[in-house]
Image: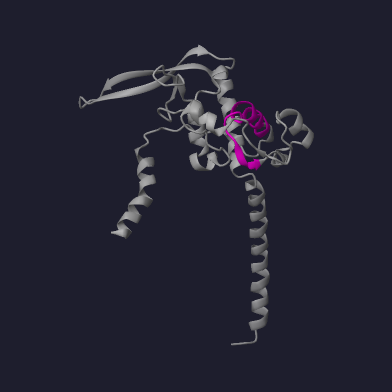
């Protein structure tokens, strides 16, 4: 019985994921594009860091995306934090829980837990919903407690529902998002901004990934070369033994 309960508990998260009937859009990110990462970092500190923290990420890790200490101080730090400090939200967790019903999660590894494709779909899926406390809902995350932080950039979307009938007479609902009020960016510009933000979130989740990848290539090349040397040495040692 204990083994059965353990198996069910392990399978529970998979069941939840299987029930999420969400068609994710591909996130057009490029971890090697430092300009995109720098733009994404700017969007993050301006629109996300006010509510969400990134307690596992230090400002000085932004050296990896081509920023100097002075650039970080001038453009990305708006509090009394130092370059070596972690990215902490200025919002009081207790107050945020009172306002939103839940404390905004830390975003340090959100790209690993949710995947970049989910984040890209989520950040483009907000729509107006007067039944929600914040006035916003999300197609990828129904009944989300978070308001649309980027609404001034994107504008206001509405969820349009259409009922269709297939050949067998079964009725289906099709949901589409329609832009009802334009923001300061065009649709293409907003998608590019979200892609930059998701690109940065993916970097922040694994800031040493590029370095590990380069090191892994060198290790494999060394092992390949060492294998050839070891093979020739073995043949030399055993050439007179039959």
Q: Is residue 146 visible?
A: no
User: In this picture, which residue range is highlighted in magenta?
Assistant: 36-57
Q: Is residue 142 left or right of residue 236?
A: left
The structure residue drawn at horizontal position 57% and vertical position 19%, both measured from the top left corner, is: 153
Give coordinates of residue 145: x percent, y percent: 46, 28
Give coordinates of residue 204: x percent, y percent: 61, 40
Q: Is residue 230 left or right of residue 6?
A: right
- Quarter holding the N terminus is bottom left
| Residue 6 against residue 230 in the figure, above or below | above
Residue 133 lies in what quarter of the image?
Answer: top left
Magenta stretch encompasses residue 189: no
The structure residue drawn at horizontal position 64% and vertical position 51%, both measured from the top left corner, is: 212
Give coordinates of residue 73: x percent, y percent: 75, 32
Magenta stretch encompasses residue 45: yes
Residue at the limit of the structure toward the left, as seen here: 169
| Residue 143 against residue 60 in the figure, above or below | above
Q: Nearer the viewer, residue 70 or 33?
A: 70
| Residue 180 against residue 111 in the figure, above or below | above
Q: Is residue 160 visible?
A: yes
Q: Nearer the viewer, residue 131 or 90?
A: 90
Residue 87 lies in what quarter of the image?
Answer: top right
Give coordinates of residue 53: x percent, y percent: 59, 36
The structure residue drawn at horizontal position 73% and vertical position 32%, both measured from the top left corner, is: 80
Residue at the limit of the structure toward the right, as seen here: 70
Q: Is residue 159 left or right of residue 26?
A: left
């Amino acid at each position: 019985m204990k083994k059965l309960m353990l198996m069910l508990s392990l399978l529970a998260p998979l069941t939840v994921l299987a029930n999420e009937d969400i068609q994710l859009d591909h996130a057009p990110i490029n971890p090697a594009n430092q300009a995109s990462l720098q733009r994404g970092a700017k969007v993050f500190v301006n629109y996300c860091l006010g509510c969400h923290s990134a307690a596992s990420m230090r400002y000085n890790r932004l050296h990896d995306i081509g920023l100097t200490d002075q650039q970080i101080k001038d453009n990305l730090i708006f509090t009394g934090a130092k370059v070596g400090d972690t990215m902490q939200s200025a919002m009081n967790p207790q107050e945020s829980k009172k306002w939103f019903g839940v404390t905004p999660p830390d975003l340090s590894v959100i790209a690993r837990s949710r995947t970049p494709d989910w984040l890209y779909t989520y950040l483009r899926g907000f729509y107006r919903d007067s039944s929600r406390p914040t006035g916003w809902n999300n197609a990828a995350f129904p009944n989300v407690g978070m308001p649309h932080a980027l609404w001034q950039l994107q504008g206001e979307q509405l969820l349009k529902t259409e009922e269709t009938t297939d050949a067998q007479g079964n009725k289906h609902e099709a949901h589409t998002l329609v832009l009802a009020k334009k923001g300061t960016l065009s649709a293409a510009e907003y998608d590019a901004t979200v892609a930059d933000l998701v690109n940065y979130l993916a970097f922040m989740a694994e800031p040493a990934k590029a370095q590990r990848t380069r090191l892994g290539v060198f290790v494999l090349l060394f092992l390949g070369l060492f294998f050839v040397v070891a093979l020739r040495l073995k043949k030399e040692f055993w050439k007179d033994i039959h």
